[in-house]
Every structure is written in structure tokens, then in C-alpha cells.
Image (tube, coloured by chain):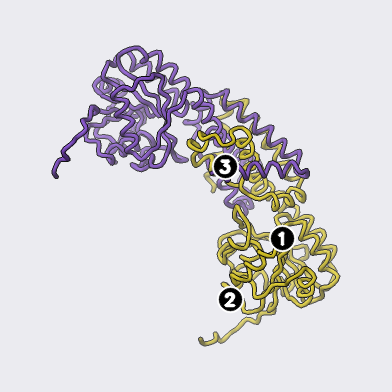
Chain colours: A yellow, B purple
Amino acid sequence: MAETPVQIESKITRILIVGTGLIGASTGLALKAAGFKGHISGWDATRVERLTALEMGAVDEVASSREEALSVARHAHVIVLAIPVMGILDWLLELAPVLRSGQLVTDVGSTKLQIAELGQGLFGGGGARFLPGHPMAGKESGGAALAEAGLFRGAMWLFTPFAEEMDELAVEWRSWVAKFGARTLDLDAARHDELCAWVSHLPQMLSTALAALLEDRFGDAPEIAAIGGRALRETTRLGASPYSMWRDVAMSNTDPIAETLFALEQRLAHVRENLKTPALRDEFALANRFRARR
Amino acid sequence: MAETPVQIESKITRILIVGTGLIGASTGLALKAAGFKGHISGWDATRVERLTALEMGAVDEVASSREEALSVARHAHVIVLAIPVMGILDWLLELAPVLRSGQLVTDVGSTKLQIAELGQGLFGGGGARFLPGHPMAGKESGGAALAEAGLFRGAMWLFTPFAEEMDELAVEWRSWVAKFGARTLDLDAARHDELCAWVSHLPQMLSTALAALLEDRFGDAPEIAAIGGRALRETTRLGASPYSMWRDVAMSNTDPIAETLFALEQRLAHVRENLKTPALRDEFALANRFRARR
């Protein structure tokens, strides 16, 4: 094939993906599908995850220990932390002393305030840079086996940068994200966590609570399976989400999530107390208006 | 075309559908798609609904007034009441004095205890029969224009008969419902209302409350639209449902719905108080188990 005459030079030629589960492996596949020609290393604490990612071509090689991954990190242009929030905090602490100028750390953690605050302290001076990120994509189950190059197409990839100036590597990383087909938006980290509590964490906790309540109440009663339709299926679908991922979200965004849950409890009580009054009509009218915009 | 040698004789040749909205018009279309060769009359208090149903061939003719519909009912083998619950109660009271043996009334109301109790008093003696029914099918919006012959395919069509013996017309009506592709299940009316409160009314009230809460809190803030993904979309989808239909459900099934809402409020408080404790893991485990069965 003929080379196109104008080539934008890629500064990023070596990437390390820490955590080759659903999001990490999909990031590797998306990079390759978007034309990334550099080298992608991977590391996952779970052996089957890193071998699956390798097998499916999401990464070109895998480290065989955390120590090896850390030494690969010293030579990567971009290190993508694609693990739960608490693990990201650990990695930031480990990476900060060994990285240098000309390197960029980014992450995909679901909550951003703790990560951004720690990251600013560690990477806010000179040397290596840090760009906190959050692709709003996923599936009910995780794991490399479900990874797809198209996972981020049409999804929102949020960033919560703490520096005004745009680092060259960060600019290029953003351009790769755009090539994945994702939309991007920059937010303040605290605002990110508050908004995500409403649009993501509350729906999750709600769905988990509803499914758990029904499980407690009905167990495997055949009638529930027989008569439950789309309404039940949709409102409990997220109940299949794994605790392993949500534990860290609940831990790192406790107050905003608690606020949304409390507000919903009060709202449900309001509906309950007004099942026979015109206030129920007002509630439906508000809900109709919310949906009409979407 | 050659006749098949054995023909099951159809007793039902004249049907009146009262309420030619989504469910009523879909019932007419489903009857025709299933090979019903008799005559279908329709009535709807809203002129555009009855004319739309006529135009799309869901009914063969429409009455032009409630009085005319009532006189058509005198000569119908089956009268299908496809209107909200309170309207069904009104029609049962009007039909009882004018119908006779050899006629069957059935309905599609979302709650069954009030309807079955009134119907038993009115039709439980001799004369015309009544078979309470409830197809669990629908869309976020109603209206004849959205009607489809296939609306009931794979859906559950519940019955809450109060008589043990199977009337001949009721047997034939059930066979038409089976031909629509619906599954059927007989339930006690009170149990029906309790189960539907859990699998249908609670998801609805929940979705309405969540959408109303977000509307109150964020109005048309662009960020919510930008970052809300599938989780938000699915848990608020039912928020588009019209009050006009749910008012009667809330009115006629108040206590069971209130019980489910109260239980969910307590469950959400439990989650809120345990965002940082191992009880959250138990909640996810229960929810996972509920979903694994479905």
C-alpha cells in the first residue's frame, strides 16, 4: 500500500496496559483497530486474563509478574491503568517514583476525585504526566474474553485533567480515544463523581437492591419468572454486575452515592404516600418530561 | 382453497372491542392474523383512536357513540374490555343487566381483584359469563397507531377466573389467545395483584420516581444527557409511561404497591448504610443470584 504523503508523527510507540480485563483488553483491540503500529504490553494479576488478552491480540506481550510490569512501565510512553479504583491508587504510588518526563499515565477508573487528588500530588510537578480518564462503557460481566475493539464506539470517555496546559502525549492519547469512536468531555473531578453518582452509581445500587429484594422475597418461585416481563428485566439487569468492581466505586464515592440513595428513598416514600392523590400525576408529568428529552 | 376435512366449529363470530387503543387494536389485529373470520366491532371514547383502529383494519366497524356500542354489545358473543381499570368497572355495571346466556365478557385490566370481585357479583350466577384477563404486553406509549398483530407473541396472558367450570365461549377465547402466540397462566386474583405489584407496578413507580427526581434536580442540564448511558436509559425508560393508565393501577392496587415501595425504601437505606461494609457484598451476591436465574 502507498503511504499517504503527510504522516502525523506518533510520539507514542510503547504502551503498557495494566489490567487486561474487559476495558483494558478492549483498549488494546481498539488501538490496533484504529491503526496503532507501536508495541502494546499488558499485565493482569489474573493469569487467565492476561493470557486471554494476549491470545486475542489485544496486547503483543504480557509481563509475568507485577515487578516485570513495573519495569516495563519505565520504558512505556503511555501507561493505561485499567483496574478498579483502589488498584489504580496503589499503582499511582508505585509508578510516581520510577517514571520520568516524556511519559504519561492515564486511567479508566469509575470515580475520579480520589484518583485525581492523589495523581495531582504525585504527578502535578514536573516529570511524568497524569491524565485521569473514565470511559463510560462496559458490560454486565467483565473479563478479557468479552473485549471488543468497538466497545467505546459512541460511548462517552470523560477526562478530569487537573492541569490547564495540554501535554503533547496527552493530546495524542486523546486523539486515539477519538479514533476509538468515543465522544469526550472534560469535567472537574468532584463534579464528575457527583454526576456519575446520579447517572451511573444510583441506577446500579437501585438495580442491585431491587434484584436482591426480589431474591429474598421470592427465591426461585416459578411465577416471578413466568410473569416478569421487560419492565422487570430492564430494572434488574444491572443486578448482574460484580461486587468486585462496584466495591471500589462505593468506597471511593461514598458520600455522593449516599446522597442520591437518600433522595430516591424520599422520592419513593412520596410516591407511596400519594398513590391516590393528584401528586402522582405531577410525578408522572415530571418523569415524562425527563424522558421526552432523551 | 380446499377445506380441511375436520373443522372446529367457532361459536364466536361477533366480537366487540371496547377501547381500541394499543391493546384493543392489537387484539383485533391479532384475531385477524390468527384466522378469525367473524365480525369485529369497536368503540373508543376518543374519536381518533376508533378511526385509526378502523383504518388499520383492527376492527370492521366502529360505533359512533357509547349508547350504540352498548347496543352492539347485546348481540356480540364476546365483549373485550380493553380500557383502564376504572372504565372496566363502569362497563361491567352497564353490561350486566343487558347481556344474556351465550355471551362472554373478558377484559385486559392491569389489576384484577376489584374487577374479579365486581364481576363475580354481576356475572357469577347464570346468564352471561365473565373471564377476567390480563395480557402482560405493552409499549411506553399507547394508542391504536402503535398496535401490532404480534404484540402478544411470547407475552404472558394471565387469567383470574372465579368459576371452576370452563364455559364453552371462555374455552374458545383462550384458544384465540393461544393463537396470538401468548403463554397463559391462571392465578387467584389477589395473588395476581400482589405478584404484579412486585414485577410490574414497582418497576414502574421506581422508574417514574427516578426520572422525576432527575428532572427536578437537573432539568435540561446538558451533562446528564451527555454522560447518561445504558444504565440510566434502562432504569428510567418506563418513566415515559402515561399517568392516564397508571392512575387506575395505583387506585385499584394501592396497598400491595405501597408494600413493595416501602420494602424497596428500606432496602435502599440498607445499601446506603453499608456502602463501606461487607453487607454490600451480600447484597450484590443476592442480586447476582436473582439475575443468574433469568
* Residue pointed to by mark 1: A83
The amino acid pointed to by label 2 is: Gly
Q: Earlier in the sequence, mark 1 or mark 3?
A: 1
State the image coordinates of residue A153 (x, y, percent, origin top left): 56, 63
User: Are the residues flagged by discs 1 and 2 in contact, CB closer than 8 Å?
Assistant: no
Q: Are marks 1 and 2 on the same chain?
A: yes
Q: Are marks 3 and 2 on the same chain?
A: yes
Name the residue nearer the viewer: A50 or B251: A50
State the image coordinates of residue B112 (x, y, percent, origin top left): 46, 24
Residue B52 in sight here: no
Q: Residues within 10 Å of mark 2 (few under 14, many from 20)?
A: few
Is A142 located above or below residue B92 in the figure?
below
Name the residue nearer the viewer: B200 or B10: B10
Query: Which numbered dot is residue A235?
Result: 3
The amino acid pointed to by label 3 is: Thr
The amino acid pointed to by label 1 is: Ile
Disc 3 on helix, strand or loop? helix
Residue A253 in sight here: yes
Left or right side of B140 for B206: right
Q: Earlier in the sequence, mark 1 or mark 2?
A: 2
Query: Which numbered dot is residue A35?
Result: 2
Mark 3 belongs to which subunit? A
**Quarter of the image where one finds residue B206:** top right
